[in-house]
Image: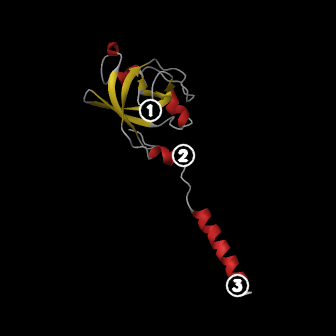
Amino acid sequence: MASILTLVFIAFSSLMLISATPIPTYDAVLEKKAATHHGKGTWFHPGMGNCGNYNTDNDPIVAIGLDLYKQNGGNNCGQWVSITSNDKHAYGIIWDSCPGCNNNDLDMSPTLFQKFGPLDKGVLDIKWEFQPRGWSP
């Protein structure tokens, strides 16, 4: 009888340990990607973005590459990024995807792009990083 009780106790304890082990959420996986991306920065006129928000040229909007957007299931919507170009720094918030961008490129609203250079420049060399979910400048 004692051995059955011991087996039941061990089984119950094992189940409790398994259920108490935290399972990493998708956001936790995304936030661990603290890599610096090196790519091209372009600009566009925002409107209704892929994330479902309507934005204007005056909002600091960023569109990430469509493949990256799909890879992350759109979970980067509303996440801020830190951008550096031409020895200048600014933050933008992801509210759209960019079909013509690769995973290291960003398409920016005019107001954000102009923090790094004039619109007639068209394309900038940039480096950028995701900021932690829930963070804002």
Q: Tell me, for residue 26, which label it has, or none.
A: 2
* Residue 54 screen position, x and y as percent: 53, 24
* Residue 55 screen position, x and y as percent: 49, 24
Q: Residue at x 65, y 67 (%)?
A: 15
Direction from residue 114 to residue 16 in the image, left or right:
right
For discs 2 and 3, the disc positioned in front in the rendered view? 3
Please report contact status of discs 1 and 3: CB closer than 8 Å, yes or no.
no
- Residue 90 lies, with reference to residue 131, above or below; the image says above
- The one nearer the camera, 5 or 120, is 5
Direction from residue 51 to residue 63 in the image, left or right:
left
Q: Amino acid at mark 2?
A: Tyr
Distance between the alpha carbons at the discs numbered 1 and 3: 60 Å
Q: Residue at x 65, y 76 (%)?
A: 10
Residue extending furthest top?
120
Q: Residue at x 52, y 30 (%)?
A: 67
For discs 2 and 1, the disc positioned in front in the rendered view? 2
Distance between the alpha carbons at the discs numbered 2 and 1: 19 Å
